[in-house]
């Protein structure tokens, strides 16, 4: 049965953040709030935890996971981009975007798109996520919490607990955080393409 932490969305309690980070380090799967609904997350490169997330979402091995990162310096470890794209990122993060990049060799192979060797990257605008990433010191491997057969991200932490309490190690209640998905933007040296419209304004990438 999952633990259930009520964490303040503006002033996250340090004690609970430390406990949540420890759950992730120990191989746990968590549900946590972002600026675009709730997500499932686990430790970077933990295959067993990744397989548990795939089972919850009923995902095949071709589904792209996202690395949720603290800041641009952390992104540069896992994604390839030039100065022009850096400036674009700096002006639009943190925020409700998922960016698709060519991946560096630091990204575990099982997280990559199998043909294009790309990776999704996010820097959510969320004090809870920022505090958790700061405590962990590395990205969270993540995917939106959309149940099989549904199209919308789950938004109510109590519903998440009732539905998935035996499949998760921790549910973080950070309150309501919207239902719109992120805007997905593919960024590389040759082109910029908005792949999916969502909560983020696409205009900067037009």
Image (cartoon, rainbow, N blue to C red):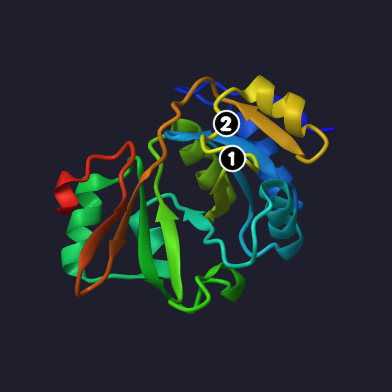
Q: Are marks 1 and 2 in contact (CB under 8 Å)?
A: yes
Residue at left offset 24%, top offset 46%: 92
On-image quarter of the N terminus: top right
Quarter of the image where one finds residue 86: bottom left
- The one nearer the camera, 175 or 18, is 175
Q: Nearer the viewer, residue 122 or 192?
A: 192
Which residue is identified by label 1?
Answer: 145
Cα separation between marks 1 and 2: 6 Å
In the displayed structure image, the side of residue 103 where residue 58 appears, left or right: right
Q: Is residue 27 above or below residue 33?
A: below
The local crowd at label 1, few if under 14, some if 14 to 19, many if 20 or more residues have their Cα within 10 Å, is many
From the viewer's perspective, is 102 left or right of 54?
A: left
Residue 111 x, y percent position in the rendering: 56, 67
Which residue was labeled with disc 2? 154
Q: Nearer the viewer, residue 131 or 129?
A: 129
Is residue 80 toward the left or the right of residue 88 in the image? Answer: right
- Name which quarter of the figure residue 202 lies in: top left
Position of residue 102 measured from the top left corner of the image (x, y, whole percent)? 37, 73
The quadrant holding residue 30 is top right
- Most extreme residue toward the front is 149
Labels 1 and 2: the sequence-earlier one? 1
| Residue appearing at x 55%, y 24% in the figure | 174
């Amino acid at each position: 049965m999952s633990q259930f932490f009520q964490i303040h969305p503006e002033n996250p309690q340090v004690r609970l953040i430390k406990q949540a980070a420890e759950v992730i380090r120990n191989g746990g799967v968590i549900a946590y709030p972002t600026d675009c609904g709730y997500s499932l997350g686990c430790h970077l490169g933990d295959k067993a935890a990744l397989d548990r997330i795939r089972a919850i979402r009923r995902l095949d091995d071709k589904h792209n996971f996202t690395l949720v990162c603290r800041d641009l310096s952390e992104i540069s470890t896992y994604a390839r981009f030039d100065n022009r794209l850096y400036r674009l990122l700096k002006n639009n993060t943190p925020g409700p975007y998922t960016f698709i990049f060519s991946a560096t060799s630091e990204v575990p192979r099982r997280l990559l798109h199998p043909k294009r060797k790309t990776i999704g990257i996010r820097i959510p605008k969320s004090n809870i996520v920022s505090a958790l990433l700061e405590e962990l010191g590395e990205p969270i491997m993540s995917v939106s919490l959309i149940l099989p057969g549904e199209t919308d991200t789950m938004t109510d932490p109590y519903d998440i607990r009732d539905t998935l309490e035996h499949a998760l190690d921790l549910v973080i209640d950070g309150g309501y955080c919207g239902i719109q998905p992120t805007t997905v933007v593919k960024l590389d040296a040759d082109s910029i393409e908005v792949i999916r419209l969502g909560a983020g304004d696409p205009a900067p990438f037009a």
